[in-house]
Image (tube, grey):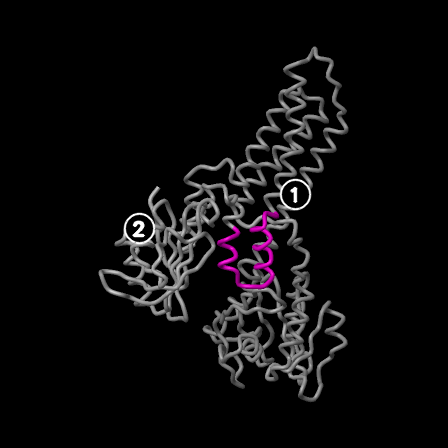
Amino acid sequence: MSTIAAIATAPGTGGISVIRISGEKALEVAERVFKPANKKSVFEMKGYTACYGGIYGGGNKLDDGILLVFHAPHSYTGEDTAEITCHGGMLITRRVLRACLEAGAVMAGPGEFTKRALAAGKLTLTQAEAVADIINSKSDQFLKCAAAQLDGALYKKIEEIKKTIMDLAVQISAWIDYPDEGLDSFEISSQAGQLADCRLRLHLLLESYDVGQALRDGISVAIVGKPNVGKSTLMNLLVGCERSIVTDIEGTTRDIVEENVILGGTLLRIADCAGIRETDNPVERIGVVKMERRLEQAQLVFAVFDNSRPLEKEDYVLIEKLRGKNVLCIINKLDLENRLDMAYLASQFGRVSEISANDRSSLKKLDIAAAKMINPEKLDISSGFLANERQREAARKAEKAIEEAERAVLGGAALDAVGVMLETSLYHLAELTGENVSEEIIDEVFKRFCVGK
């Protein structure tokens, strides 16, 4: 296998950059590029040690830097690995990488270091996928989930299920192959109970998928209300800058303005929508139609009401549209004289937050209110979750096979038929953990990785 190299740090100007080299000739490449200040050979360096020295390419000194060495199999990839740290300028970083390539390495592909770790048995496929999730995490909650995955939470849970099914499959196989050996007969209730338990555990994992996706991609939120209640001011408060245009003219917001923000420890995809009202203006009407469509799709709604104005027809229309939805009622302009029927709104909505959107201290109130509504803690981080569609589909097929086996046992089906169903479930569970996947699937998984990891 070729020796690969890539820039492991993010592109751009910074304090340092790291160029990672891995493969059979990693130390040989490092020896040609890096000259230790103590005049010793790179091959003399012990694993997990660092050395200061000069970095060379094309016969010229490029920079001063640090070399880290990891000997196989005690490295991330399981291969000999070297990491050269240089100053963080884009030009110098690329020159050091070029020197490594000229010294015998080849450019690494997306995620190729992690792919080699998978091939070496250093990681399972679910752990490898967790590496990409950690790198791409946009909220504290999802980062914690991804870290648990990297620690093997999902793999361990699936292995427990596999062990139960494997034990049942072995017993059935022994009963079929050696019917005259005096083996104890099966307790039907016990078999069905164990299968039901496995099916339930998979079902709970499948239910966690939507929560995990919401934490990964963000929860869609629509800010709605009649014109001039302060929706755009609220949007700007959440974003932290003048993202939406704010005026006293009704109908200023005509198209949907979208931004990602962190609130309640979770990523929210917030949309500032046009005010709900009847209008003859065809352009404004398009904005209202878009608002209604976004309202239908939203997982969470911030319904804004003006504390300084009594409830009007548009407010009551909106309240009716929000029936059955996950809504945070936001009473805005608390700094103005109260003319709003707060008691009525409290009776219509489960959660109410009273703020002044032009006061930054209101952000803390919204953060607390959103955290209570989103409640990401309902996802048991320590027990693992299904992180992507590949895992979900494998779990769904495994659950179906276990359910069929459970019905077959209760229906008195032949044991060899039950055994086939159990083998099918084991096949799909092995797909989930990566023990039974094609090279095409592995390649697809690593397409979403950055180069250098």
Element under disc 1: helix
Magenta part mainly helix, strand or loop?
Answer: helix
| Part of the protein shown in magenta | 130-153
Q: What residue type is labelled 1?
A: His
Residue 179: image x %, image y %? 68, 13
Indicate yes or no whether the magenta region holds residue 143.
yes
Element under disc 2: loop
Tally of numbered tags: 2
Q: Crowding near pointer 2: few (<14 within 10 Å), some, many (20+)?
A: many
| In front of the other: 382 or 282 | 382
C-alpha distance separating marks 1 and 2: 47 Å
Residue 223, label in figure: none
**Quadrant where the N terminus lies?**
top left
Question: Mark 2 highlights which residue?
Answer: 105
Relative to 254, does residue 380 appear above or below in the rendering? above
Q: Residue at the far front: name it.
A: 39
Relative to 172, does residue 368 appear above or below in the rendering? below
Mark 1 or 2 closer to N-term? 2
Residue at left 67%, top 76%? 365
Residue at left 56%, top 45%? 392
Relative to 288, does residue 376 appear above or below in the rendering? above
Residue at left 49%, top 80%? 242
Q: Residue at the far bottom: name it.
A: 337
Question: Mark 1 highlights which residue?
Answer: 203
Residue 11: image x %, image y %? 38, 65
Q: What residue type is labelled 2?
A: Ala
